[in-house]
Amino acid sequence: MTNFIAGISGMLTLIAYIIYGNKILSGNIKSSVATWLVIGFISILNTLTYLKTAKHFWISSRAVIGGFGSAIIGTIMIIKNPHLGALSNLEIAVLIVGVLAVAVWIKKDAGHGNLVVMVAVYIATIPLLVGQYYGTVQENPTVWFLWAASAAFQMWSIFRMWKEQPENKNGLQLAYPIAGVGMHLMVGTMALF
């Protein structure tokens, strides 16, 4: 049952990225190019830390799909908008936090590195939220709510894994899905207005 629930999480993530990519290609979404580049970098780092921490392929599927999906979205956005311009101070701060996460991972462990990555992901969404507020960014709430649901299914699968394999219980495994539910609900809710 755990693999099935975790598989739903991964599939919801994949479906949301396919919808999002198509909407970007068709011009229906106007997002922050630099933010997606930063999120792509941070997501790949998160994928590496999450695979190391979770030690469960299906539970990690959301992180793996999200890492590659974010990198692909960032690449599509660069192709559609080759005049990226300079990164903002906020985006530079996110990259610095990402580098700090690598240092924490090397010096301490992947789980704590993943916690630092979650801080970077929350900071990286600020330009999306600000852009939505000022009308310079137009997002689709459906995909953001799909990503939030995916994170909730991942959280559920982690609780099930802990019940089945108590020796693998690690509270740090919840950082990614908790951050995912919160961040995606924030952006999705802003997209409604």
Image (spheres, helix red, strand yellow):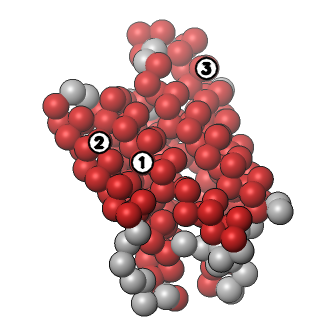
Element under disc 1: helix
Element under disc 2: helix
Q: Quadrant of residue 130?
A: bottom right
Give whichever of discs 2 and 1 has the lower sequence position.
2
Q: Alpha-carbon distance for marks 3 and 2?
A: 28 Å
Where does residue 64 sit, x and y in percent of width and height? 45, 50
Q: Residue at x 56, y 38 (%)?
A: 179
Whether residue 9 can be seen here: no
Query: Is disc 2 in contact with disc 1, using a CB cutoff of under 8 Å?
Result: yes
Amino acid at pointer 3: Arg
Quadrant (top left, top right, bottom left, bottom right) of the N terminus: top right
Give whichever of discs 3 and 1 has the lower sequence position.
1
For label 2, the residue is 101
Kindly identify which numbered label has been placed on residue 169.
none
Residue density around tag 2, few if under 14, some if 14–19, many if 20 or more, within 10 Å:
many
Q: Quadrant of residue 132?
A: bottom right
Amino acid at pointer 2: Ala
Whether residue 156 can be seen here: yes
Where does residue 17 sit, x and y in percent of width and height? 61, 64
Residue 137 vertical position relative to residue 42 in the rendered view, above or below: below
Residue 26 vertical position relative to residue 138 in the rendered view, above or below: below
For label 3, the residue is 160
Q: Residue at x 57, y 12 (%)?
A: 163
For label 1, the residue is 120
